[in-house]
Image: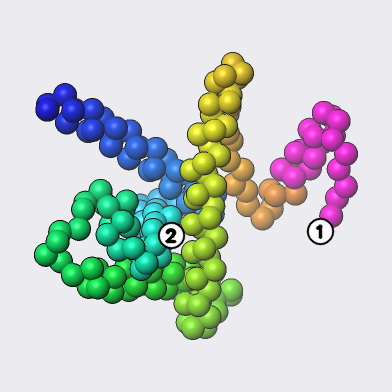
Amino acid sequence: MALLQAIVSLISRTVGRILSALFDWAVVALFGRVAGRRKLLLQVLMAAAAAWPLLLAGVVAPKAALFLLAFVPLSGSIDPGAVRKIWIALAVLVPVAVGVTLGLLAPAGRRESKLVSLLRGFPITVGLAAAFVVLLVTVPVLRVVSVLRGRRDTYVPLVTTHESYPVAARLVAETLRRHGFELARAQ
C-alpha cells in the first residue's frame, strides 16, 4: 500500500508541475511578464477557464464531472440536484470572473463598461478553454515526436514592447526569407 501511495504522490507532483508550467506559459503568452499576486491571480483564472468545460459537463452529469475534476466520488447521501446547482453557479461565475478580471486589468484608455466586460468573459473563457485543450493534446504529442526523431525543441517566447515589435518582426521575416519562405508585409 505504501508503494502505491508513493507512486500516486509522485504522479500528482509531476502533473502539478506540468500544469503549473502550462498556466505560467499561458499567462506570459497572454498578458506578458507579471509577478507576485497578479501572476497568481492570472494563473488561477487560467486554471478556472481550463476547468470550465468540466463545469459545463457537471450541469449534465454532476457525479461524473465531480469525479473527473476532484477524483472524489459523490456520496449517496448528497442530492445530485444540489450538486447540479453548484455546477450551474460555477459554470456562470467562471466566465463572469474572467470578464471582470480582464476588464480591471485593461489599460485605462481601453476600459469598457462593466456589463460589456462581464459579458466578454464568456467568449474569452471559451477561447481560453479551447486553447488549453489544444495545448494539453498537441504539446505532449510534439514532444514525443521530437524525442522519436532525436531532436530537441527549444521555445523562446517573444514578448516585446510597442517600440521593439517592428525590429523583432523584421528580424523574423529576414530569417524566414533566408530559409526559403516567401513573405509579404501586411497590416
Q: Position of residue 154 (x, y in %)?
A: 58, 29
- Residue drawn where x is 23% and y is 33% of the image: 8
Quarter of the rendering containing residue 85 = bottom left
Residue 122 drawn at (x, y percent):
50, 71
Q: What's the CA distance linking mark 2 and mark 1?
A: 35 Å
Q: Is residue 1 above or below residue 139?
A: above
Q: Quadrant of residue 5?
A: top left
> Does residue 185 belong to the magenta stretch?
yes
Q: Magenta residues?
A: 168-187
In the picture provided, is 145 more to the left or to the right than 27? right
Q: Secondary structure at mark 2?
A: helix
* Callout 2 crowding tier (Cα within 10 Å): few <14, some 14–19, many ≥20: some
Q: Is residue 145 above or below residue 19?
A: above
The residue wearing badge 1 is 187
Which amino acid does the dot numbered 1 rest on? Gln
The foreground one among 29 and 75 is 75
